[in-house]
Image (tube, rainbow, N blue to C red):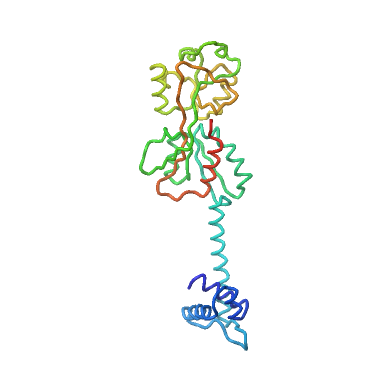
Amino acid sequence: MTLVQLRHLIALADSGSFSRSAEALFLTQPALSRSIRALEDELGQPLFDRVGRRNELTPFGREVLARARQLVFEAEELAASGRQMREGQAGRLRLGLGSGPGALLMTPLLLHMATQHPKVQVEIARGQTGLLVEQLRGRQLDALVVDARSVEPATDLRVDALAELRGTFLCRPGHPLTRRRKAIAFDDLRAWPIASTPLSDEVGRILIERYGPAAHPSASVTLRCEEIASLVDAVRGSDAILLAIRKAAPDLVELTVSPPLAASARFGLVTLAGRAEAPGLPIVRRVMDELLRD
């Protein structure tokens, strides 16, 4: 039997007339008769008795009708649920955020979901990229937004680069270095603590190329933390220098360093290859596209 046949049964039971039911279902009367007859043949018993000009349910037909209504209702609910999830109106989204994306995305994304998609359950995890990747592989997370360079290439991971943001050196307004008239050398920066989140090997290579071996993060960074927001607060209240994406701290002063850093963070959306995409991910992409811009 099919849902179509069950819908035909319900329509005929409601109207009692083959002609009216066929018209409402946009069928010919013979087609509706064949559908009901096929259902009766499959179930092995008649569903309707003809009483005068009206078709009335048999006792067995009444039992089948009650179950048919429930089955059709459940099927329609499933279809509606799938449609709502596809349109971002329901479902669950479990997202892992690296330090940089977390600082820029977490609050705006939560606000957007609360106001625009209040029926979607959102869970956000923060942490080191390697740990987040393990949670993704363990199906504890649906996707990650991290620095794409920090993800080791693997056949089971799909990395879609979605944004590239410029990195720079930053300090508080009124910092002694802001009074320099000429470009600042990297050695000048090292007179103060340098703060950053854990940096990718690519950024470490760029630092060494630009400023020499002493610029390697293991030697030059004195304040290291996964949470960039905490580093920004520390720099606001001290003479420390922040190495970070410019957008992470709009109120801090960008320093003119010679030679220029010319490095960037490449944020990507990481999912498991071959896995069905969580319904809420298109929303994340849209929010990223709006927010992750220099």
- Residue in the foreground of this view, choosing between 67 and 27: 27
The answer to which image quadrant residue 291 occupies is top right
Pinpoint residue 177: horizontal percent, then vertical percent: 55, 13
Who's the residue at 62% across and 84% down the image? 54
Q: Is residue 101 above or below residue 279?
A: above
Who's the residue at 51% across and 39% down the image? 125
Q: Is residue 268 above or below residue 19?
A: above
The answer to which image quadrant residue 176 occupies is top right
Pinpoint residue 140: horizontal percent, then vertical percent: 47, 45
Give the mark count.
0
- Residue in the foreground of this view, choosing between 93 and 158: 158
Extreme residue in the bottom direction: 52
Q: Is residue 120 above or below residue 16?
A: above
The answer to which image quadrant residue 238 occupies is top right
Pinpoint residue 185: horizontal percent, then vertical percent: 47, 13
Q: Is residue 203 left or right of residue 282?
A: left
Q: Is residue 219 above or below residue 161?
A: above
